[in-house]
Each structure stands twice: as C-alpha cells, then as structure tokens.
Image (spheres, rainbow, N blue to C red):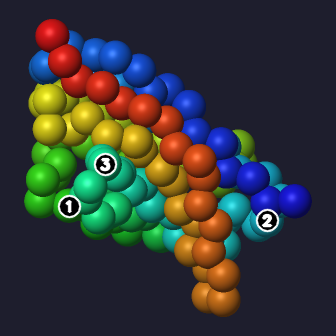
C-alpha cells in the first residue's frame, strides 16, 4: 500500500522557519521524482519545488526561490522542505507528490500557517 505522510507543519510567525517532511512507503522511493505543492482555498495547486530521483537536480517556484530548500534521503525514504523567511502568503496546505514514469502518488498534506 502506497503511503505519503507529511509532517512538520504548524503555526509560525512571519520571518520564521519550518521543516516539512514526507515519509514514503509502498513504492521504490529512490526511483521517483519528488515534489512539494501547496494549495489554498479557491486557488489552483501550486508547485513549490521538485527534486530528481537520484541526481539531486532541483527546481523551485520563483515565489519561494532563495527561501526554501528541497532535499531527500533515499535511505530513509523521506523528502524534506526547509522553509525560511516565511511570509503570510506562504500559508497553505503543503502536499508531497511522487512522480514516476507511469504513476503518481499524493500525500494528504500538512497545514502551514504564517501569522503574527
């Protein structure tokens, strides 16, 4: 059974930091590209960052570039998103996605709220 479980969300003040994790099981994590998306009510799901399966190649949305770092530990089957200098507009549900050549899986998401 495929599972992607996000954690690490919460309430943080503007300018603060959070580290999100996404723990995977039920598929060969190291062969999938992994991404973080975020979604707010009434808006389309937005790609935040992507990391390739083994090369470590990364892509970031312009809205978060230089503030977030995506990384993965293929031995621990875990994806990370380090977020710094958080802004109120970063408030969203953050979801991880595993993308393979023939299939894709989503987690349920973790809420990040940036507010004073």
Q: Does residue 108 appear in this view?
A: yes
* Residue positioned most to the bottom: 102
**In this figure, which residue is indicated by the disc labeled 3?**
41
Horizontally, residue 68 falls left or right of residue 20, namely left
**In this figure, which residue is indicated by the disc labeled 1?**
61
Callout 1: SS: loop
Question: Are the residues flagged by discs 1 and 2 in contact, CB closer than 8 Å?
Answer: no
Looking at the picture, does residue 14 appear above or below residue 58?
above
Callout 3: SS: loop
Which residue is drawn at the image coordinates 38% and 56% (left, top)? 37
Label 3 vs 2, first from the N-terminus: 2
Residue 79 at x, y percent in the picture = 54, 47
Residue 20 at x, y percent in the picture = 46, 34
* Residue positioned most to the right: 1
Which residue is drawn at the image coordinates 53% and 62% (left, top)? 97
Q: CA distance from mark 1 to mark 3?
A: 19 Å
Quadrant in which the N terminus is drawn: bottom right
Q: CA distance from mark 1 to mark 2?
A: 27 Å
């Amino acid at each position: 059974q495929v599972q992607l479980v996000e954690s690490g969300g919460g309430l943080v003040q503007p300018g603060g930091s959070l580290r999100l994790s996404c723990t995977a099981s039920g598929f060969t994590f190291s062969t999938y590209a992994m991404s973080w998306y975020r979604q707010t009510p009434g808006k389309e799901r937005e790609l935040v960052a992507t990391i390739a399966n083994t090369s470590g190649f990364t892509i970031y949305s312009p809205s978060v570039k230089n503030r977030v770092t995506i990384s993965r530990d293929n031995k621990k089957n875990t994806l990370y998103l380090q977020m710094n200098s958080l802004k109120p507009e970063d408030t969203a549900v953050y979801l991880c996605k595993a993308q393979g050549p023939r299939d894709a899986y989503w987690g349920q998401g973790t809420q990040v709220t940036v507010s004073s």
